[in-house]
Image (cartoon, helix red, strand yellow):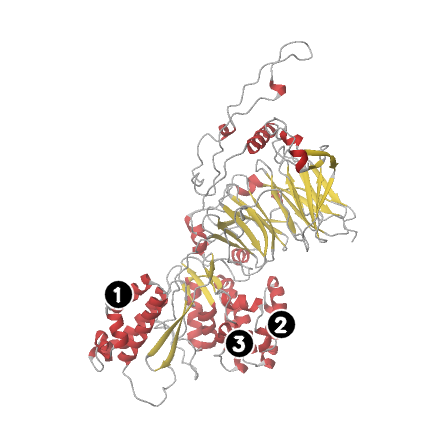
Amino acid sequence: MAALPEEPAEVVTIKPDPDAGTPPQPPAAPPAAAAAPPAAAAEGEAVGSGGEAVPPKPAAPGPAASPAALDRQTLVAVLQFLRRSNLRESEEILRREARLLGDDLGAAALSPAGAGLLGAPGSDADSAGGEALLSRVTAAAAIAIGGSVATVASSSPGVAAVAAVPPGKVGGGVVVEDQPDVSAVLSAYNQQGDPTLYEEYYSGLKHFIECSLDCHRAELSQLFYPLFVHMYLELVYNQHESEAKSFFERFHGDQECYYQDDLRVLSSLTKKEHMKGNETMLDFRTSKFVLRISRDSYQLLKRHLQEKQNNQIWNIVQEHLYIDIFDGMPRSKQQIDAMVGSLAGEAKREANKAKVFFGLLKEPEFDVPLDDEDEEGENEEGKPKKKKPKKDSVGSKSKKQDPNAPPQNRIPLPELKDSDKLDKVMNMKEAARRVRLGPECLPSICFYTFLNAYQGLTAVDITDDSSMIVGGFADSTVRVWSVTPKKLRSVKTAADLSLIDKESDDVLERIMDEKTASELKILYGHSGPVYGTSFSPDRLWATDHYQPLRIFAGHLADVTCTRFHPNSNYIATGSADRTIRLWDVLNGNCVRIFTGHKGPIHSLAFSPNGRFLATGATDGRVLLWDIGHGLMVGELKGHTDTIYALRFSRDGEILASGSMDNTVRLWDAVKAFEDLETDDFTTATGHINLPENSQDLLLGTYMTKSTPVVHLHFTRRNLLLAAGAYSSQ
């Protein structure tokens, strides 16, 4: 598995504004984390990685140590940690910041004489620059550690210690601790304010946001849900059960409807013991909730919290939220609603900036033999037929390399076997007879209904040549049917195979046993429900390895569907965390994170040209994505239940969707993707403008009597096949 790059953890804290009145006063009890020096949030910065700087508790009685000496101890401890962790580059960055030579590290650690490196106790450097240097060092350490999570803890006046948590799995720029220790995860909830004031804090912020100007209200309203969750969890963890119950009952109804499933899980966490080992709570705690807010809205929020001295809210913002600030006009409620809804908020803009080679690879060239009907002969009138021009090669369709395509050798592709070449030849011949679809020429639909499926149909697939259909069932069986007159046969026994001439042209026919021919074959072997079937080989596993070649880690919940990109360089995954991720097969990196669905994802489909992705979920919406720019470019509304099937026609003109609402819907894909707004401002800020009504893209709706649609497939000639199990309910 290729190592995934990690993002540096930026430390940004609040800085009092000169015109903001009295800054917030520190609480009586110090928080677990002290902050880096105040800094203004810049474009694209993560706000909320640090904490509010507050005066710490007085140190226990004992020999006094000068600030400079304690600073040096902290610096040495950080450098030693980086060296033990083999983080040489980070060590060099920190050493340069502290102006400490490489050979001086050991001396500073072993001898008091090393104290002179940063200024002697009592000197001007000690009194005037010690605290500032420590602030620079701790800030540099947090950045130098890279993707690790750095906690800066205060233990005595002017002293801070840096502890680094090992970096976890990273998917799309979200730092996720690898199997986090439950006690460590929950420790952030140790420091909390007066439990009786939590409702007052939350209602005060809620009133402020609701009274804000419309342009800021929509953006600031994104704070409600993550603040509600973390404030509730703090109360539960600190065993204020009655206050937690009152807080939940008062404010849970104010949250958006698409968070109701998460809130049901949250409502079951009523005691501290319930939190340990709870997967949902750990996911929410270990991945910072991402909010995208304009600079004006952020400044308004910061000023309010300063004036009200609401440290409790601000500490949660700093500790648990990642505020992605952008310059420009605030987004409208419609623009925000289109992008929010996932378990961890929106995707960071940096997560969708990597270059993606979405173009198609150039087809290999080889000769295409003529059909029998193309041979010269006589027609019914006895006149010789006109000889059709011979096609040059399969690759003649792609006259030049797609500029957006990956290099031909970017990933190792297997050499084409004779059977592969034969299949491509058949594909090209079928494509020559393909029906050109469009608004004036809709496809015919053939529906395969599984009757008496008492075993429980859980998965369906159809071969690319549309000759076989397979069903996976809850009783652990896999059943394969032939949908052509050609029956399914088994391979002959080893003794019979030894008598066959391996060099004969019809060897593939000779090895099959005609005595076993039937329309149905049942495959046994699974010990549980079969949730996925495929006739295509998976590139995720190789037969000469017993371990996976790539592990794509980053989703916060179950992966529910997968789909390879047409050029085989990428794979898309949909998850119950309500996000779609695009992974690079070459190195395992997450190159795109798409948010906007309000329920688990159950269907994915790439357009034939590789540029666009369609996704369907339990929210009944089909979302369209521009892979190159990393933007949502369309929303198709009409289904009233989960969308389990999506498929583009072979020429990309039509998008078909199948749902549990017993309907197949056809959409105009060409019109949906034309005149896209992909300028620099839209790409940088995510200010997408979706049409309010998608009915002008709907070309047709086709209902079954009582059969949910679980699979769709366009044949090579653009006939649409659909499948599902009849339901008497």
Give the foreground label among 2 and 1.
Answer: 1
Q: Amino acid at mark 2?
A: Ser
From the image, tell me which residue sits under label 3. 234
First in sequence, mark 2 or 3: give its number: 3
Residue 22 showing in the rendered view: no
Q: Amino acid at mark 3?
A: Glu
The secondary element bearing badge 3 is classed as helix
Where is residue 416? Give x, y as percent. Answer: 52, 34
Residue 249: % across, % down: 62, 74
Left of 140 or right of it: where is 592?
Answer: right
In the displayed structure image, the side of residue 256 where residue 79 appears, left or right: left
Amino acid type of the residue that numbered disc 1 sits on in the rendered structure: Arg
Res. 412 in view = yes
Earlier in the chain: of badge 2 and badge 1, it is 1
SS at mark 2 in the image: helix
Count neighbours of disc 2 (C-alpha within 10 A) and say few if under 14, some if 14 to 19, many if 20 or more. Answer: some
Residue at image location 27% in from the left, 79% down from the top: 69
How many residues crowd mark 1 within 10 Å: few (<14), some (14–19), many (20+)? Answer: few
- In the rendering, at what x and y percent does residue 659 appear? 67, 49
Mark 1 or 3: the one toward you: 1
Quadrant of the snapshot with the C terminus: bottom right
Q: Residues within 10 Å of mark 3 (few under 14, many from 20)?
A: many
Tag 3 or tag 1, which sits nearer the N-term? 1
Q: Which of 124/219 is in front?
A: 124
Residue pointed to by mark 1: 96
State whether residue 395 is above or below residue 323: above
* Mark 2 and mark 3: Cα distance apart in space: 14 Å
Name the residue that disc number 2 marks: 267
